[in-house]
Amino acid sequence: MRASDGKEKTSLYPGILPHHFERLRLFEKENAELKPGATIFVGDSITEAFPIAQLADSERAVNRGINGDLIGGWKYIGLIDRLTTSVIAAHPSRVFILIGINDIIQANMLNMPQEMTPLPNKILNYKRILAQMHKQLPDCKIYVQSLFPLGRDFAKLNPHVLAFNSELKKLAAQQHCEFIDLHKAFVNAEGKLPDNMTPDGIHPSPEGYKEWLKLLPLEKKTS
């Protein structure tokens, strides 16, 4: 598989690639019918499970999350390699981006810490994502969301999350994007994602998604 930079790339979890390409085919079909001006949520499995149905119809929210996705642009394929299909071709008016946790946890889950994307590479390729969106979508408002803290068995990786979020906040300011600090909103006194907010230490629980929705400057459906 060749990524956007022409290099041969795969995934740390090759088994997820069929889902990856199934999602991209869905996005292409949606783009053919989508009118300009939608609100796009783009990221990994945390975004793929985001409850966009709870947003008002007027927000025209579209979900472009893909399970297992990375930032990309280093050894492994990721968001940077699908940005045109997932975001640019949809001509959105707003984009909410949340990406990077898999760049931290996947290598450690596989006991391959040497395969973790170095922090400078993560930030550099995140910058490439934002720069491409600015260039090709000059009127689009971009919201950069921090990573959630990790909980349960993954809490040991929180120093990596903190380091990434610190650099990401600087990058968002440099790139004139609005920064949404999910970490600050969710972290508990122990520096972790609370157990009631996550079933596995990574993904939000239903209550977690409910709290996340409250932080976004979007109109929600009234019950």
Image (cartoon, rainbow, N blue to C red):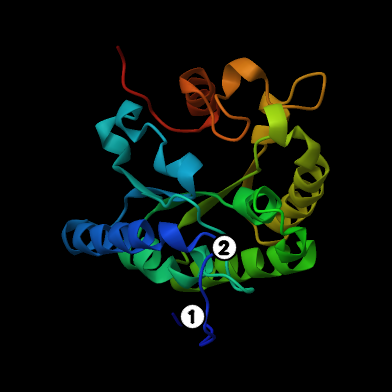
Give the position of the N terminus as an image quadrant.
Answer: bottom left
54 left or right, relative to 156: left
Kind of residue sitting beneath label 1: Ser
Q: Residue furthest front?
A: 111
Give the position of the C terminus as an image quadrant.
Answer: top left
Which callout, 2 or 1, points to the residue nearer the camera?
Answer: 2
Label 2: few (<14), some or many (≥20) within 10 Å? many
Which of the 4 image quarters holds residue 55? top left
127 left or right, relative to 49: right
Between the residue at mark 2 and the residue at mark 1, the CA separation in whole angstroms equals 18 Å
Residue 139 visible in image? no
Q: Residue at x 35, y 56 (%)?
A: 19
Label 1: few (<14), some or many (≥20) within 10 Å? some
The residue to which callout 2 is attached is 12
Q: Residue at x 55, y 24 (%)?
A: 199
Q: Residue furthest left?
A: 33
The residue to which callout 1 is attached is 4
Q: Earlier in the sequence, mark 2 or mark 1?
A: 1
Mark count: 2
Q: Secondary structure at mark 1?
A: loop
The reply to whether dot 2 and dot 1 touch (C-beta < 8 Å) is no
The x, y position of residue 147, in whole percent, is 65, 42
Q: Secondary structure at mark 2?
A: loop
Q: From this view, report whether residue 1 is shown above or below residue 45.
A: below
Kind of residue sitting beneath label 2: Leu
Q: Residue at x 64, y 18 (%)?
A: 195
Residue 89 visible in image? yes
Observer-nearest of 204 and 41: 204
The x, y position of residue 183, in whole percent, is 70, 34
